[in-house]
């Protein structure tokens, strides 16, 4: 009999459902929420209402695209946290209700494990996957971590941000440039036409593998404040160069620590994950670093970088194989690490 897992993701502003059968992805449906654009950031109450609106059609569509019915499912995996509590409650309640109705196991997934294990999502039997142990640079709107992945069940955070996340630095700086939310993709696009050496922004001097992005953000703001006193059109005239210089600094901060981690651990495989891993400069820089160090780089397809249920179903798949089922009384959690 086929082993089929439904994955459900609702941690932030994307409602997603995916089906994995015998380890192969059959469908991955994502309903994004444009309602937040007008507010320049995700409004939690609106996000949970939109999840309620989207969850039934999203799950139905994932089952339809996979060519299965609910009675074919072996288990339901869902994101328990971290994320927005109201949003998580929608996915959690739906997953629990469906698991009770079908009398099949429920599997809670840590969203961050999903990102780290997204490289195991196979669209065909022949897709390759990383070898353990590997390092994962997990960079998103809420996290910047270097994770040592010893197995699907054993991960260790070697370094993480002590203040802002890399995505947050992109988004906050983009906001003062007048770019729409989330700003990361806009900075990526504009940076292509800019001079990355034109402006110098601060980089942290932290020993070890921890990150910090708040100093960069402050120095970016001070540069703008001082320049705008002299020239009110400074931003318009220098937008591409500001984006390119900011992006280059983020990449440099991320990559310096990643290189140190590769040298310290001696791993032979390095992966990246999370929304910021969609960034062109981050992807190129990781590729180059890995070639230089003689290790294999795992750069995810862009559709698996941002929040998606395929990675949740995959992390759930590993737990299912290990019979790690969840108690129906488990509440969602807003904050946690790996
Ligand atoms: O993993 P993710 O979808 O979810 C959250 O952590 O919320 O990551 C979202 C983050 C945002 O900060 C967004 O600006 C950033 O990923 N992002 C990018 C790019 N695409 C998404 N940052 C830089 N360049 C990109 N191309």
Image (cartoon, grey):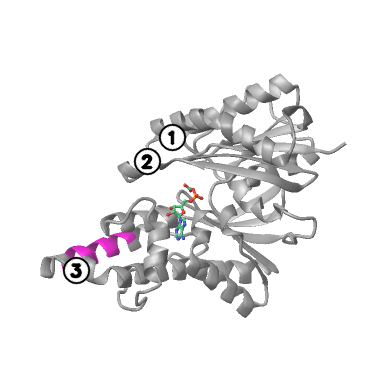
Q: In which quarter of the image is the N terminus?
A: top right
Where residue 47 is drawn, which disc sits there? Answer: 1
Q: Do the residues labelled 2 and 1 touch (CB within 8 Å)?
A: yes
Q: Is mark 1 on a helix, strand or loop?
A: helix
Lower position in the chain sequence, tag 2 or tag 3: 2
Disc 3: CA contacts within 10 A as few (<14), some (14-19) or many (>=20): some
Residue 57 image position (x, y, % from top left): 57, 32
Q: Residue furthest top?
A: 101
Q: What element carries label 3?
A: helix
Q: Is mark 2 on a helix, strand or loop?
A: helix
Q: Residue furthest left?
A: 230
**Which residue is denoted by mark 2 in the rendering?**
36
Residue 122 image position (x, y, % from top left): 73, 53
Disc 2 from disc 1: Cα separation: 8 Å
Instruction: Determine the image quadrant of residue 201.
Output: bottom left
Disc 2 from disc 3: Cα separation: 28 Å
**Which residue is denoted by mark 3 in the rendering?**
234
- The relative height of residue 100 versus residue 74 in the rendered view (above or below) is above
In percent of the image, x 62 and y 47: which residue is there? 114
Q: Give the range drawn in magenta.
A: 217-227
Instruction: Determine the image quadrant of residue 289.
Output: bottom right
Q: Please say whether residue 316 is visible from this viewpoint.
A: no
């Amino acid at each position: 009999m086929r082993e089929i897992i439904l994955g459900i993701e609702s941690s932030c502003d994307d409602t997603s459902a995916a089906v994995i059968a015998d380890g192969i992805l059959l469908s991955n449906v994502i309903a994004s929420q444009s309602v937040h654009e007008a507010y320049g950031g995700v409004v939690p109450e609106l996000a949970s209402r939109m999840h309620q609106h989207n969850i039934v059609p999203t799950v139905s569509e994932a089952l339809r695209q996979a060519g299965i019915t609910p009675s074919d499912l072996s288990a339901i995996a869902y994101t328990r946290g971290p994320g927005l509590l109201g949003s998580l409650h929608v996915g959690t309640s739906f997953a629990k209700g469906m698991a009770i109705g079908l009398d099949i196991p429920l599997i809670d997934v840590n969203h961050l494990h999903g990102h780290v294990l997204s490289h195991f999502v196979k669209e065909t039997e022949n897709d390759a996957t990383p070898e353990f142990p590997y390092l994962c640079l997990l960079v998103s709107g809420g996290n910047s971590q270097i994770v040592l992945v010893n197995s699907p069940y054993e991960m260790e955070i070697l370094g993480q941000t002590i203040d802002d996340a890399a995505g947050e630095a992109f988004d906050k700086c983009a906001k003062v440039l007048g770019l729409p939310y989330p700003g990361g993709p806009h900075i990526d696009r504009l940076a292509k036409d800019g001079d990355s050496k034109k402006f110098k922004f601060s980089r942290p001097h932290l020993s070890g593998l921890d990150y910090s992005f708040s100093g960069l953000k402050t120095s970016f703001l001070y540069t703008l404040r001082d320049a705008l006193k002299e020239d009110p059109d400074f931003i318009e005239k220098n937008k591409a160069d500001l984006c390119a210089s900011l992006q280059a600094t983020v990449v440099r901060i991320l990559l310096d620590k990643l290189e140190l981690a590769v040298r310290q651990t001696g791993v032979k495989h390095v992966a990246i994950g999370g929304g910021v891993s969609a960034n062109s400069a981050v992807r190129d820089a990781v590729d180059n670093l890995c070639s230089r160090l003689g290790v294999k780089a795992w750069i995810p397809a862009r559709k698996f970088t941002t929040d998606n249920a395929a990675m949740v179903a995959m992390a759930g798949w590993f737990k299912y194989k290990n019979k790690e089922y969840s108690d129906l009384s488990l509440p969602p959690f807003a904050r946690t690490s790996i």
